[in-house]
Image (cartoon, helix red, strand yellow):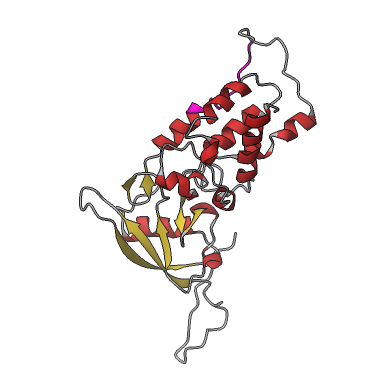
Amino acid sequence: MATPVLDKKDAAGEPEPGFADSPYITVTIRVRRFNAEVSAEAVWEDFQLEIDPKERVLDALHKIKWDLDGSLTFRRSCAHGICGSDAMRINGKNRLACKTLIKDINPEKPITVEPIKGLTVLKDLVVDMEPFFQAYRDVMPFLITKDTNEPTRERLQTAEDRERFDDTTKCILCAACTSSCPVFWNDGQYFGPAAIVNAHRFIFDSRDEAGEQRLEILNDRDGVWRCRTTFNCTDACPRGIEVTKAIQEVKRALITRRF
């Protein structure tokens, strides 16, 4: 990939021959900072930096941490929209920082970055994910069969059977859907959309034999019936999963016991 060439002006302010205009713009990244060792209150802090608008918010956070303030704390791993670790609220909307381009979120105004809601903030943009993962574990997100012996051949499945739960296999456990849910904001005991999506993935898997167990788990007062169908979760999902549809299918399975 070609390295961008910074612009070079002559005495009259005109670009010198052979030099291209700079692709960089000045943006303000407004980060919600929290450090319990310093203060019990969160504060907003502005950082100004030069950046190519085709770069991502994650790149901007890297520039801040590496060049301006090494104490800035956030999670990230793969940086390619697969690990889901860098979910955060950007301009008031849950997004993955590694998939959000600067140019797509109006860089002429300060870009606000804050932690996802509904989970305890540990420091800056890092939240305690344990309640989220506990709900995930509670729905038994793994294949269960009555046969205690290892299979002697592959568990076959038709293309149609696989398609039945294809959408919910896309979940990357970023918590963007769960932390966008107003029910979860007000009651952290609610399983939340992500846990229900991962239960859906196995409830409708023709090879699994624990669908009834998972349905009973989700039939709890903190299960699927708490969903108010606001579609926040579907809008927030960076993988395009039809989360609300999956939740409704689980509700229907609870009523009809057909899945």
Q: Where residue 72 appears, x then y in whole percent?
A: 33, 53
Front residue of 111 and 121? 121
Residue 132 belongs to magenta span: no
Q: Where residue 33 appears, x then y in whole percent?
A: 31, 56
| Residue 64 appears in view | yes
Magenta: main secondary structure equals: loop
Q: Residue at x 63, y 11 (%)?
A: 146
Q: Which stretch appears magenta? A: 138-146
- 221 vs 258, left or right, is left
User: Farthest bottom residue?
Assistant: 12
Q: Is residue 109 above or below residue 232?
A: below
Q: Residue at x 54, y 38 (%)?
A: 225
Residue 142 belongs to magenta span: yes
Quadrant where the C terminus sits is top right
Q: Where residue 39 appears, x then y in whole percent?
A: 21, 53
Front residue of 89 and 76? 89
User: Farthest front residue?
Assistant: 255
- 121 vs 16, left or right, is left
Q: Is residue 78 above or below residue 31?
A: above
Q: Where residue 222 appears, x then y in whole percent?
A: 47, 35
Quadrant where the N terminus sits is bottom right
Numbered-mark total = 0
Q: Is residue 87 above or below residue 110?
A: above
- 100 vs 26, left or right, is right
Q: Residue at x 47, y 55 (%)?
A: 58
Front residue of 37 and 255? 255
| Residue 169 appears in view | no
Front residue of 184 and 241? 184
Q: Residue at x 48, y 33 (%)?
A: 221
